[in-house]
Amino acid sequence: MFPVMPQQAVTHVTIPASDRAVSLRGLRKSFGSVVAVAGVDLDVADGEFFAMLGPSGSGKTTVLRMIAGFESPTGGTVELGGRDVTRLAPFERDVNTVFQDYALFPHMSVLENVEYGLRVKKVPRAERRARALEALKSVRLDGFEKRRPAQLSGGQRQRVALARALVNRPRVLLLDEPLGALDLKLREEMQVELKAIQREVGITFLFVTHDQEEALTMSDRVAVFNAGAIEQVGTPAEIYERPATAFVAGFVGTSNLISGATARAVLGRDGTFSVRPEKLRVVLGDAVPPGSDEHSAEGTVSEVVYAGPATRFVVDLDTGSRLIALQQNQEVSSMDVMGLRGRRVRLVWQRRHEFAITS
Ligand code: ATP
């Protein structure tokens, strides 16, 4: 038998009750005949940066809204810090939400925007000011107090929205597509920034995204949603390197599935297996036979996509499946790799990089 990692390793870790910031049990929500959330169980630990990742319509925003209290569940419970808040109003819950459009008041200065929540709560003026300045400092916006939102960049506006939530010192901060309104370059910068801010303030961040790279880059753990349910929960590395289901393998990264006749011929067994494109080596000819800890499959290169630092090879295997291999362009030029289109190759990978998945 060759090594196939047990699937239990990639699904749930048990978080002690005293360390749970958020606990969802059997959470469900229907809108008329539409089942938006079909029974979700999830524990998020204190201080975690946690992503709910999934395609549009998979129910992640509805889960976020039920945690915030904007939506009441059809069934199940929401606990925050061990307290059942399922029936409480949003303002009675120790959470704050940062919305995708930031919802800043345009006629107020940055400082007034950040102070607003504390003013509503009748926090004395001096304390209000001190806490707002501290929150602005934590998002690296000191010096911007007097500006209006219109005088800020998208990334700066995003940070004001963050400061406005952090000033309340919530136990959990909920973020709905926090970087969705930013362009790609700024989004990449803010991914790093947001993570650094979260580490500094130490508050639990729970965010919704449909962007797999964003989820993998920022999070301590990720829950992958599909059709109102969670398919897998794990660290970014577990989700990426050991996808538990065909859906996760396809949604997070490139789906490279080995099944049917290919699984029987190449792996010597039935089932569905996944191996990531960068784990495959493209070898010309039979010069180097695969080692005992490796598997290999022969085929023909049907497509070559040169992408600067790396090249993607689409290989049609003799057994009928198609696999994608990603190779670094360390010592080759675009001319070298383009010449491989139509050539016979062998794909070689280490057995430890293939994983059984449920389809
Ligand atoms: P997106 O990334 O597009 O926001 P999502 O994963 O967050 O998607 P939800 O917004 O939670 O998904 O929606 C889940 C399902 O519930 C969808 O089919 C959606 O159309 C439906 N839905 C959400 N809110 C309502 C509502 N207020 N009334 C009716 N149906 C709704």
Image (tube, rainbow, N blue to C red):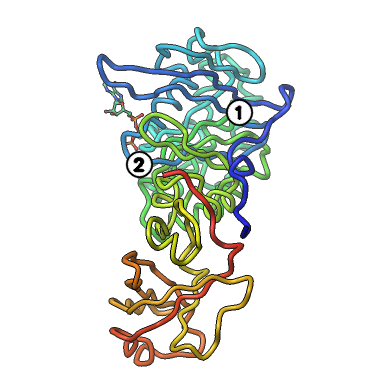
In which quadrant of the rendered view does residue 197 lie? Answer: top right
The residue type indicated by label 1 comes to: Asp
Mark 1 secondary-structure assignment: strand
Q: Nearer the viewer, residue 299 or 314?
A: 299
The residue type indicated by label 2 comes to: Pro
Residue drawn at (41%, 49%) of the image: 211
Q: Residues within 10 Å of mark 1 (few under 14, many from 20)?
A: many
Above/below status of 349 relative to 126: below
How far is mark 1 from mark 2, CA to CA? Answer: 21 Å
Tell me if label 1 and label 2 are in contact, CB under 8 Å. Answer: no
Q: Is residue 302 visible?
A: yes
**Which corner quadrant of the figure contains ligand 1?**
top left
Q: Nearer the viewer, residue 80 or 40?
A: 40
Earlier-in-chain disc, 1 versus 2: 1
The label shown at residue 55 is 2
Residue drawn at (46%, 75%) of the image: 347
Residue drawn at (62%, 40%) of the image: 8
Mark 2 secondary-structure assignment: loop
Measured from the top left, where is residue 252 in percent x and y? Answer: 44, 52
Instruction: Give the quarter of the figure containing the C terminus.
Output: top left
The label shown at residue 43 is 1
Measured from the top left, where is residue 300 in percent x and y? Answer: 33, 79
Q: Residues within 10 Å of mark 2 (few under 14, many from 20)?
A: some
The label shown at residue 284 is none
Q: Is residue 216 visible?
A: no
Which residue in the rendered view is the most extreme toward the left? 33
Measured from the top left, where is residue 189 in percent x and y? Answer: 49, 58
Above/below status of 180 relative to 320: above
Tell how many labels.
Answer: 2
Instruction: Give the quarter of the figure containing the N terminus.
Output: bottom right
Residue drawn at (46%, 17%) of the image: 69
Establish whether ligand 1 lies closer than 8 Å to the Cβ of label 2.
yes
